[in-house]
Amino acid sequence: MKRGPALMTAATGLAGALALTGCSTSATSAGGGGGGGLTFMTFETPALTATFWDTSIAEAQKEVPDTKIKKIVSPDADRTAYAKQLQASGQFPDILSSVNPKDFSAAGLLKPFDQKWLDDNFTDPDGNAIDGKSYIPPTNSQVIPMIFYNKKIFAENGIEPPTTWDEFVDVVTTLKKAGVTPVEMAGGEPWSAAIPLSGIITADVLGADPEWIQKRYKNEVKFTDPGMTAAVGKYRQLIDAGAFDKGALSVSYADANKQFLDGESAMYPMGSWFIGQIPAAAAKDYGTFLLPSATGKPIVPFNTGGTTAVSAKSSNVADATKFAQAWSLSKANLKTLIETDGAFPMLKNVPFEEFGAKVTPVYTDGFKLVTEDNTKVSAFGQVNNDDALPPGLVEQFNSLAQKLFTSSDVKDELASFDAGWDKAAK
Amino acid sequence: MPSRSLRTGRSLGLAPVAWIAVILYGMFLLYPLVQSLFLSFTDKNPLQAGSAFVGLANYRELLSDDRLLSSLLFTMIVVVAVTVVANTVGLLLAIVLNRSSANYRVMRTLIFIPQVLSGVIVGFIWRSILTQNGLLNSALAQVGLIDEPVAWLGDSQLAVLSVCTVVSWITIAFATVVYTASLQSVPQELYEAARMDGAGVLGRFRHVTLPMIAPGTTISVVLCLITTLKLYDVVAVLTGGGPAESTQSTAFYLISVAFTDNRFGYASSIAMFLLALTAVVSYGVTTLLRRRETNL
């Protein structure tokens, strides 16, 4: 008789704990600083280690000697979601690294940087602008994706880097026949699974109409429109042609990097940050090309990067801004980002040599895409400016890229994505 | 004659400690629960200060949310599979290990380890085993059982199977301990009496063991159900809900709605629904198993 109620209490307690975990909230006023201290939310990757962050923080802190900077490390790569959790529990950091600012700026949680400071220091001062204001200094840029290829495998199979989609498909077919995995895919992690699909959409849809995302926000276009359907159909075409390994969706990013560098696959669509993963000694064996667009015109899928955003609710916005500016302009930080993360710097009046970074020919080729006069468009689902997708849509897009491995009904999947967009953009 | 203060102390007994527990329970469980209930009737965004009352709109949306439905379906598959596997295997292991020698004590301790580990650690361990180039594929390839790696986490159906296996691995440890404790409380005289009545191994199991461990079965089954219904950590690390959301549990979806889609209000309604579902399932199964205890 006594056990029943006890069990029910335990049941209610455990389930209630879930409700508590998922949905408790507290005051929405932010600002974790105060008392002479500021919090800085960072994230760690194999390239951006704890030592990098500690060193860079110590260097930038010289600008605010009376303020102590406390590092908060995001438990995983999704620092935007972590920042939201911190906000929900009243611990929004004073300074945030590499979050998607759109959600936060719309809620008035971020302080825009001074336009004159941006104009004075960056080659593309409005590269991260949302409604005319920049919440992340545009310190560097990325190309997402570049198609990395193994020169040796290409040479062995008599293949040249393709410049049209048909040539690209021919390359895939030739490699497949030769028993080589044509395209590496880190499909086990949703963000990296979506890179090839993002590349195709960027090349074909945004390449043809750079305003496409803005038009979607205004409901002037749909994902089910013929141009988008055709682009996504190309992704299905690659899957059907066996371009990716059968088990691609269980390959982690780290494993995919290793497999490609070990010569187990011929091509690898990935962000330019992968340059940092190619050992300098082996760099001569790799080349890059842009994913061919429908028209054959080279389209550069471009993203303006940057790190530090400042909380508008910080107890010491002035010092937080000073710290963020110092961090962003630090040549030492950029040097590390160039060497380990393949970042392309966009600091004004700082010749590349001044960073003192050692780079490979793969980096130099990629950097040309940034500096040369060409057609740059927002990399679909990858950017932090006005062309960023509504909340939750990046995750749905990543999931769509995985779903299309088993679903051939492109139109139906895109109709669902349209519905998701409409709900999220409300 | 005891002093007044001593008498007061005796009459209070452990009441102050109990009150602390009640207060903590209220602060950290009841209050957030009520707050979640309140939020479930709003359009609360975690990034915005205010929110508007939306009545039952969030609850109406639950009925037409395909992603919620598929997360529920996945969760229920895991709940049923894990509860059956964990209790069956847990009972078998408990019977095998129900000996008093040191070897068996060590084995019981080893079997309990998965329950002690955090779900995040378990997720990482199994991820390294089940990925494309993981230990399992390497082992299978070395003994010649497979020619090419099996996508344990990359194929939707295999990923569901993988999650069920990993969660069962954890839960078996718990079930084994519960059943071991239950078995050790069964008086040996009953087995002797049954043996004298001519009962064989199966007969003793059917007529002595099962009825005597029935209370343990109730506890094990119900707690397995509850822990699996709120499955989050293993999924988050092992599969991230993928591929293509095929292993997205309801709790995982709930967190995603709250912190990715910025829909705290709707996420709260999912949490309330999950709470109600857990309570109903727990109550139903408890009632059923308690009736069974009486009948055995």
Image (spheres, coloured by chain):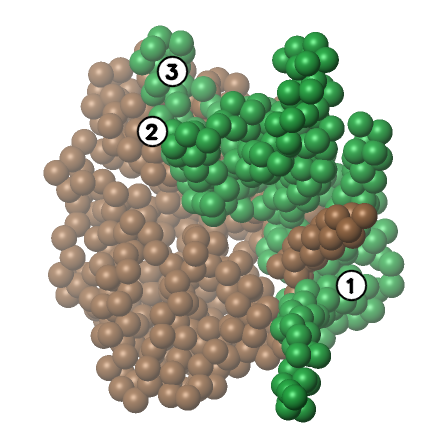
Chain colours: A brown, B green
In which quadrant of the rendered image does the C terminus of chain A lie?
bottom right
Residues packed near mark 2 inside 10 Å, few (<14), some (14 to 19) or many (20 plus): many
- The amino acid sitting under disc 3 is Leu
Distance from label 1 to label 2 (Cα)? Answer: 51 Å
Instruction: Locate residue A78, reporting x and y percent.
Output: 47, 54
Residue denoted by label 2: A267
In this view, the residue in front, B150 or B166, is B166
The answer to whether the residues at label 1 and label 2 have Cβ atoms under 8 Å apart is: no
Residue denoted by label 3: B140
Q: Which numbered tag is attached to residue B37?
A: 1
- The amino acid sitting under disc 2 is Met
For residue A317, which quarter of the picture? bottom left
Tag 3 subunit: B
- The amino acid sitting under disc 1 is Leu
Tag 2 subunit: A
Above or below for A165 versus A337: above
